[in-house]
């Protein structure tokens, strides 16, 4: 019998089923369907200068995911906002200023184990805030390396589900290779990264994969489209073959944590000229302009 104890959690604020508490004190039932079956959804909302970034877009996606799982949304949008902002302020009081991430999770609730979507359960609601880990200046100036792999995950990728074993296994491929992300292909066409959407640039135009069940529509889908439109950059969503990705002038990742991030090496070979490209620079600059300004 081992006497080793797990690393203790920091006493950061969180919210669980109507009560504000701390991470070490928060407890859920061992019969929660999120714990047993991965039966739930989540969202991650970036926070800049104490303000929730693209909050309504995240709530729209949360509603879509919940509808797919037939789980009722247990809170109104103002309630979600109020809880999030209270946690943001509580986290900043402990950890100080800086970019943050709000993580919220809803499971179907507690019941004896059963694969069916049991009706009438009370959803389990959890939310916490952590310090964000933005890309480093070196990553932005030199770009990052990625590797490719076949997309072996399920065909309901549009649901932001907490059952993330497929994403964990996909990400580990790039971890083992010393790379920043795993860019995946399904039947020869680009799908997405383990935790990112993927964009290519060719001849000054940006292309991404269609909005469908094979990819999670990141909040930056609409944001990248808006940035392109405002900058006069051609933009389209379509099927993108593996050969197009290999021949791209630029490859760009997007996610809540990465914002937009240039890929300069793919499977050990340079992307384009092997440096962050001009379209990335324009998208990144536009992204920064949309973020709330730091109070003086």
Image: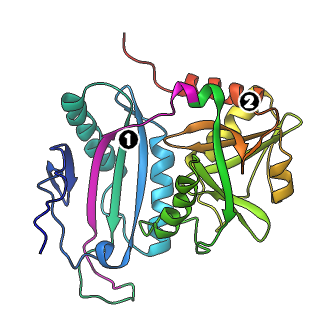
Residue at the spot x=68%, y=36% of the render? 226
Q: Which residue is mark 2?
A: 275
Residue at the spot x=51%, y=66% of the render? 169
Q: Residue 206, percent across and down? A: 79, 41
Q: Secondary structure at mark 2?
A: loop
Q: Residue 63, percent across and down? A: 46, 60
Residue at the spot x=71%, y=42% of the render? 265
Q: Secondary structure at mark 1?
A: strand
220 relative to 237 in the view: left or right:
left
Q: Is residue 211 visible?
A: no
5 relative to 228 in the view: left or right:
left
Q: Taking 296 as reference, is 66 above or below it?
A: below
- Tell me the magenta residue range: 118-138
**Residue 123 inside the magenta-drawn segment:** yes
Residue 73 found in image quarter: bottom left
Are there few (<14), some (14-19), or many (20+) residues within 10 Å of tag 2? Answer: some
94 relative to 148 in the view: left or right:
left
Q: Which residue is mark 1?
A: 101
The quarter of the rendered structure image containing the N terminus is bottom left
Q: Taking 120 as reference, is 257 above or below it?
A: above
Q: Residue 259, percent across and down? A: 55, 37
Q: Is residue 95 visible?
A: yes
Q: Which mark is nearer the camera, 2 or 1?
A: 2
């Amino acid at each position: 019998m081992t006497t080793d104890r797990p690393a203790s959690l920091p006493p950061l604020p969180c919210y669980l089923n109507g009560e504000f508490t701390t991470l070490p004190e928060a407890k859920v039932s061992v019969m929660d369907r999120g714990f047993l079956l991965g039966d739930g959804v989540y969202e991650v909302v970036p926070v800049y200068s104490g303000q929730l970034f693209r909050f309504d877009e995240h709530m729209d996606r949360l509603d879509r995911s919940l509808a797919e799982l037939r789980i009722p949304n247990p809170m109104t949008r103002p309630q979600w906002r109020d809880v999030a902002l209270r946690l943001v302020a509580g986290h900043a009081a402990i950890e100080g200023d800086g970019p943050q991430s709000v993580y919220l999770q809803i499971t179907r609730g507690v019941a004896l184990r059963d694969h069916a979507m049991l009706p009438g359960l009370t959803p389990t609601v959890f939310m916490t805030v952590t310090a964000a880990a933005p890309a480093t200046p070196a990553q932005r100036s030199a770009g990052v390396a990625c590797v490719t792999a076949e997309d072996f995950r399920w065909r309901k990728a549009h649901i932001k589900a907490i059952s993330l074993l497929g994403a964990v296994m996909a990400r580990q491929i790039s971890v083992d290779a010393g790379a920043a992300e795993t860019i995946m292909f399904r039947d020869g066409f680009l799908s997405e990264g383990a935790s990112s959407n993927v964009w290519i640039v060719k001849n000054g135009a940006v292309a991404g994969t269609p909005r469908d069940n094979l990819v999670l529509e990141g909040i930056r889908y609409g944001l990248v489209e808006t940035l392109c439109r405002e900058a006069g950059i051609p933009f389209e969503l379509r099927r993108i073959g593996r050969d197009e990705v290999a021949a791209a002038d630029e490859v760009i990742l997007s996610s809540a944590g990465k914002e937009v991030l240039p890929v300069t090496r793919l499977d050990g070979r340079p992307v384009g000229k092997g440096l962050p490209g001009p379209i990335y620079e324009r998208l990144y600059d536009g992204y920064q302009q949309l973020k709330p300004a730091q109070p003086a």
